[in-house]
Amino acid sequence: MGLKMIKSKASDELSEMQTNGLNNDEVEQDDLELLKQEASLDYLCNLPPHRFEALYAKQIPSSIVGQSFLDGYKNHNDPVTTIDDKRTYGVKFPTMHPIYENFRVKTFKSLLTSAASTDQLTTLGELLYQCHYSYSACGLGSDATDRLVHLVQELQHSAASKAEGTTLCGAKITGGGSGGTVCVIGRNCFKSSEQIIQIQQRYKKQTGYLPFIFEGSSPGSGKFGYLKIRHRSRTDHKVCYTSDEGSPV
C-alpha cells in the first residue's frame, strides 16, 4: 500500500510539472527524471530516506481502512494478497521500515570496514537497536525478543558497565522473525560473555525459560560454499557441492 501511495504521489507531481510546462532550468529537468524513476519504483528499499522525507512522508497515513485504500488507489498491485475492505491496515511504519532498513544495512556494512574503535562499536550497536524497533513497529516483533533486547540495554547502561567500560553495545531480533533469536553485538572479551550469561539468567528469572546461547561468528557461504540441487527427473535428483570458485567438490 505504501509503495502504491508513493508511486501515485510521484505520478501526480510529474503530471503537474508536465502540465505547467518546463523551462530550461537544469535542476528542474533533473527533478523530472527523478520523479519518473519514483513513479515506477519497484521496491521501497530503493527509495533513499531523504527522498521519502522530502516528498512522501506526509502522504503516508499511520493506518487506512481497506475500502478507503481501494477507493483512492483501486489496487495494491500484489498478486498474492487480497485487501479486506473492512480491515484497518498499518501503513506508515511498514512503509518506512524497508526504506530506512536498507540505509542501515549499507551503513552497517561500511562501518565494518572502518578502523576498529569504541565509536565504531557503539554505532554498530545503535544501528541494531534501530533495526529492532523499526521491525517491531511493523507489528512483527514479540514480547520475548523485546524483553531480551531490553535486558541488553539495562546492562549496557548500568552504572557498573559505565564504570568498567561498556562491553555490550546493541541487539536486534533476527532469524525467522516474530520471535526466535536475538543477535547481540559487543566487545570480544570475557566481560561480554559474563554479561550475556547474566542476561540469560535474568530472562529465566522473569519468565521461567532459559534462552539458548549461540556464540561466535561464521565466515558464511563465502568460505564454506553452498549446495546446488539440480532437478533431473521426477525420481532422480542430483546434489552437487561447490567450492568458493564454483567448481564441483
Image (cartoon, rainbow, N blue to C red):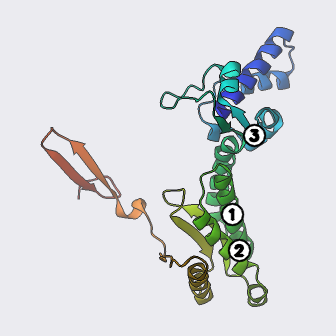
Q: Write down the quadrant of residue 56 in the picture.
A: top right
Any mark on residue 60, and which? none
Amino acid type for the residue under numbered disc 3: Ser
The percent position of residue 102, horizontal first and vertical second, equals: 63, 48
Q: Is residue 201 left or right of residue 237?
A: right
Single out the residue that lies furthest toward the front: 86
Q: Write down the quadrant of residue 113 in the picture.
A: bottom right
Any mark on residue 129, and which? 1
Q: Residues within 10 Å of mark 3 (few under 14, many from 20)?
A: few
Q: Distance from label 3 to label 1 (Cα)?
A: 22 Å
Q: Distance from label 2 to label 3 (Cα)?
A: 28 Å
The percent position of residue 167, horizontal first and vertical second, equals: 67, 81
Residue at 56 percent of width and 68 percent of height: 183
Do tag 3 and tag 1 residues touch (Cβ < 8 Å)? no
Give the mark nearest the N terminus, 2 or 1: 1
Q: Residues within 10 Å of mark 1 (few under 14, many from 20)?
A: many
Give the mark nearest the N terminus, 2 or 3: 3
Q: Residues within 10 Å of mark 2 (few under 14, many from 20)?
A: some
Residue at 70 percent of width and 44 percent of height: 96
Q: Is residue 86 left or right of residue 159?
A: left
Total numbered badges shown on the rendered structure: 3
Amino acid type for the residue under numbered disc 2: Gln
Of residues 47 and 155, the one nearer the viewer is 155
The percent position of residue 85, horizontal first and vertical second, equals: 62, 27
* Picture quarter with the N terminus: top right
Q: Which residue is mark 3?
A: 62
Q: Is residue 87 above or below residue 172?
A: above
Q: Is residue 153 above or below residue 176?
A: below
Do tag 2 and tag 1 residues touch (Cβ < 8 Å)? yes
Q: Which residue is mark 2?
A: 153
